[in-house]
Image (cartoon, grey):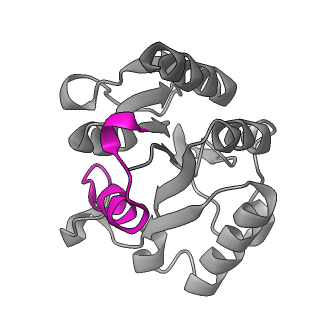
Amino acid sequence: MKGAVFFDRDGVLNEVRLIDGSGIAPWHMDQFKILPDARKAVQTIVDAGYLAIVVTNQPEITTGELLPEELERIHAALKQQVPVHAIYCCPHHKSDGCLCHKPKPGLLEQAQREWKIDFSKSFLIGDRWRDIGAGNAVGCSSILLERAYSGDCTGAYAPAHRVGTLMEAVAWVLHRRRESL
């Protein structure tokens, strides 16, 4: 069984649009911009022997704000620019009651089955309480990229570690890996 680093997409690997204090995902390809350290951060994780898996909620598919073909274009661009192994996406609205909308762990569980991932050797890097909740639900060490819009990250949504940048999150993963060897 392999270790993985699960990455939230929006606000972690690509820019979000800030609207009324909320981080909003890109709905069109012209809004999609990879963050400066994303490629280096993910490549560092891959070079360390981890799977790099993206797990993302995209409820705008259900609401019609994001067209499925536009999401495919965005994910194709992400894969072209950042060396991720796979992208798992929940297209449902949080009110749909699905098992894949973070903080529910369905996306991570699907990846675990398909890639034979050991959650005890894995990490999740996210910028919101719901990312941390999904990682915690399966026993990953969760790392919060602290943002003004992260929400209440306490209790079941408390991360193992808090950082300000993606490269700090990667450094913490590598440090924890060295400690466990």
Query: Total label count?
Result: 0
> Residue 123 location, x and y as percent?
43, 36
Q: Dividing the picture into quarters, in which one does residue 137 lie?
A: top left
Q: Residue at image x 34%, y 72%?
A: 92
Outermost residue, front direction? 181
Is 53 situated left or right of 78 in this image? left
> Residue 174 location, x and y as percent?
58, 23
Outermost residue, bottom direction? 69
Q: Is residue 122 above or below residue 82?
A: above
> Residue 25 location, x and y as percent?
58, 56
Main SS of the magenta part reads: helix
- On whether residue 172 falls in the magenta region, the answer is no
Q: Residue at image x 28%, y 39%?
A: 133
Is 172 situated left or right of 83 in this image? left
> Residue 57 location, x and y as percent?
43, 60
Is 58 situated left or right of 72 in this image? left
Q: Residue at image x 35%, y 24%?
A: 159
Q: Nearer the viewer, residue 126 or 24?
A: 126
Q: Nearer the viewer, residue 174 or 132?
A: 174
Q: Dividing the picture into quarters, in which one does residue 112 lie?
A: bottom left
Is 135 situated left or right of 28 in this image? left
Q: Is residue 121 above or below residue 82?
A: above
Q: Residue at image x 53%, y 17%?
A: 178
Q: Dividing the picture into quarters, in which one does residue 68 lie?
A: bottom right
Q: Nearer the viewer, residue 90 or 6?
A: 6
Range shown magenta: 102-122
